[in-house]
């Protein structure tokens, strides 16, 4: 059996390498309530993440690194000690609508192939993404709802602790979509392409953001 640290490492690895299980649809409008919620994100961040009764202020980012495209989420809670991070990797055919909006449906078992989320506090808690939707209008205003399933804690001998895994939570995100494009240099270093010009895929997916 793996230790808890091993499980969280496996989650991080799956999040970084997952191939994505999802499909896109064309209905991408946000309701008036969703727009108001997105606009209300505080100035200390571009998005607010709500999970298991706690809020984390940070960002929800469309990230392009080479040919790998993902949504990356990050944030801190009100005491700035507990953080949240995660990633949902997108399939190669992910695209935005002509007006720049999208409505992306996430589907799949909670086995790490649809993404992962981790809360880092005194005791880190990992979740795997099971299903949900990631939507944005043409101005980049967000409405995200993801169902995540908690990974079981393990004891000192590496065995699952009964009753600590399998709980489903809803991760909600409101705010404004941000974007980043990264380029891998011949030296294998990864640097930010601030102008989104080095990679044609960046220019297409990150337009207007």
Image (tube, grey):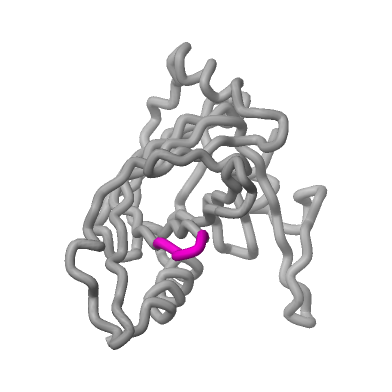
Q: Residue at x 70, y 54 (%)?
A: 181
Residue nearest the viewer, comparing 6 with 129: 6
Q: Is residue 92 something one can see in this rendering?
A: no
Residue sticking out furthest to the top: 32
Q: Which residues are drawn in magenta?
A: 121-125
Residue sticking out furthest to the left: 162
Residue nearest the viewer, comparing 86 with 202: 86
Residue 143 horizontal side relative to residue 148, left or right: right
Residue nearest the viewer, comparing 41 with 79: 79
Q: Quadrant of residue 58?
A: top right
- Magenta-colored stretch includes residue 3: no
Q: Residue at x 53, y 53 (%)?
A: 84
Q: Residue at x 44, y 20 (%)?
A: 29
Is 28 above or below relative to 209? above
Q: Quadrant of the N terminus?
A: bottom left
User: Residue 94: x and y, percent?
Assistant: 47, 48
User: Residue 43: x and y, percent?
Assistant: 71, 30
Total labels drawn = 0
Q: Main secondary structure of the magenta part?
A: loop
Q: Quadrant of residue 183?
A: bottom right
């Amino acid at each position: 059996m793996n230790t808890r640290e091993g499980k969280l490492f496996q989650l991080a690895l799956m999040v970084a390498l997952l191939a994505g299980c999802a499909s896109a649809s064309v209905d991408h409008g946000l309701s008036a309530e969703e727009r108001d919620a997105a606009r209300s994100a505080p100035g200390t961040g571009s998005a607010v993440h709500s999970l298991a009764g706690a809020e984390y202020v940070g960002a929800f980012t469309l990230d392009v690194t080479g040919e790998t495209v993902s949504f990356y989420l990050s944030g801190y809670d009100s005491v700035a000690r507990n953080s949240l991070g995660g990633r949902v990797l997108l399939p190669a055919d992910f695209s935005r609508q002509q007006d720049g909006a999208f409505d992306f449906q996430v589907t799949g078992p909670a086995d790490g192939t649809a993404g992962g989320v981790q809360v880092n506090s005194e005791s880190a808690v990992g979740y795997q993404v099971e299903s949900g939707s990631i939507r944005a209008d043409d101005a980049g205003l967000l409405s995200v709802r993801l169902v995540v399933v908690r990974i079981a804690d393990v004891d000192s001998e590496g065995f699952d602790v009964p009753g600590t895994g399998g709980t489903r939570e809803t991760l909600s995100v409101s705010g404004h979509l941000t974007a980043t494009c990264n380029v891998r240099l011949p030296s294998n270093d990864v640097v930010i392409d601030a102008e989104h010009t080095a990679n044609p895929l960046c220019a297409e997916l990150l337009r207007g953001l």
